[in-house]
Image: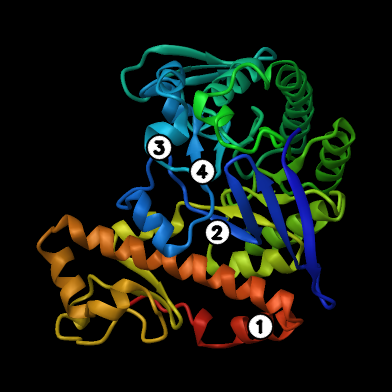
Amino acid sequence: MGLKFTVVSKDESTRARTGILHTPHGDVETPIFMPVGTAGAVKAMTQAQLEEVGAQIILGNTYHLCMRPGHERVRELGGLHRMMSWPHPILTDSGGFQVMSLKGLGKVTEDGVWFRSHLDGSRHFFSPESVMESQLALGADILMPLDECVDYPASHEMLKRSVRLTGRWAERSRKFFAENAGKLQGRDFAESGRAEIGPSLFGIVQGGTDGSLRRESALEIVEMGFEGYAIGGLSVGEPKDDLYGMTEHVAGFLPEDRPRYLMGVGTPEDLVRCVALGVDMFDCVMPTRNARNGCVFTSEGKLVIKSARYAQDPGPLDARCGCLVCRRYSRAYIRHLFAVGEISACMLATYHNLWFYLDMMKRVRQAIRFGGFGKFLAGFLAGPEQVSRSV
């Protein structure tokens, strides 16, 4: 038995909906943003802090975890949940995007991908089957199959080859998962207390910004039958109109009774717009990476706190924010921490950014439930929350 998904409410004016993902390690309310914990940790955050800011599910990266400490070591330690002391749901991506990003270090074949580690140059091979085996060893609640994500822009022929290869790899992944999911899980997974719900495998739709190939990929992946569906290969440099257009296009081919996951997206505006297009799940490094570089998200847009203009500013990062950082610390103090290289600067900025994202998604869910999402969307896009001013 895999993941169960229940649609709870729908917005009348858009495709937005709320739902509940029932996973072995707990329920997740959707639409949801998943903080990225690449190597088994969300940078600059403890697990207790993740719970404080409202994280329901986090993402781990198979490539990085296979390079260090290795999926077998994680299995020996009881699975990723136990190793990192995170008792809540985890989604693992395949690592394919990271492997494809190793310019000059990877080679794609029909069987899989040969690549060299970014750490020491050692040679490795990922196949659809080995990636499934690794994720089952990690004990993830939601697994992603190996796919090929090509650069933007790409020719029609390159995208077509990618779509066809992704489809063949998806079928191999589905077969291996079906035959092995019950016997390769981490120990913590089996002890989660929800034996009626098992790990789940999502299918991934590719095709770049080519509408006909996106349709072909979506129909093929849906025909195979997965427990959720992801839209991959976007937010890789294409114009925003293409991001939104392809998301809407693909979502129209995906089943109503399955969760929809837009991979690697994005800004607060991206999330709200794509919820309106019917997306349920998001992940992105933006809130954590931007925080470490001194860029925070506020109700008045982005704010670069390292700017000298905040050296004497006694106000909070965001007067409308209720997070611990905004209740306790001033802009001047956080700016000072960045200026002197204090590690706590990254911690405080990250805490605030993740709170901002997760609180925004909470307000989105509330607006959908109570029939006010259309008004929320219009106000969000027109109001000061999206006056994106970098200073």
332 in relation to 172, above or below: below
Q: Nearer the viewer, residue 344 or 197?
A: 197
Q: Residue at x 30, y 52 (%)?
A: 44
Q: Amino acid at mark 4?
A: Leu
| Residue topped by disc 3 | 40
Q: Amino acid at mark 2?
A: Gly
Q: Residue at x 37, y 74 (%)?
A: 323
Q: Amino acid at mark 3?
A: Gly
Q: Which sits earlier in the primary sequence, circle 2 or circle 3?
A: 3
Q: Amino acid at mark 1?
A: Phe
Q: Nearer the viewer, residue 114 or 169?
A: 169
- Marks 2 and 1 sit apart, C-alpha to C-alpha, by 19 Å
- Marks 4 and 3 sit apart, C-alpha to C-alpha, by 8 Å
Q: Which sits earlier in the primary sequence, circle 1 or circle 3?
A: 3
Q: Position of residue 273 (x, y in %)?
A: 67, 69
Foreground disc of the pair 2, 3: 3
Q: Is residue 387 left or right of residue 5?
A: left
- Marks 2 and 4 sit apart, C-alpha to C-alpha, by 14 Å
| Residue topped by disc 2 | 266
Q: How many marks?
A: 4
Foreground disc of the pair 1, 3: 3
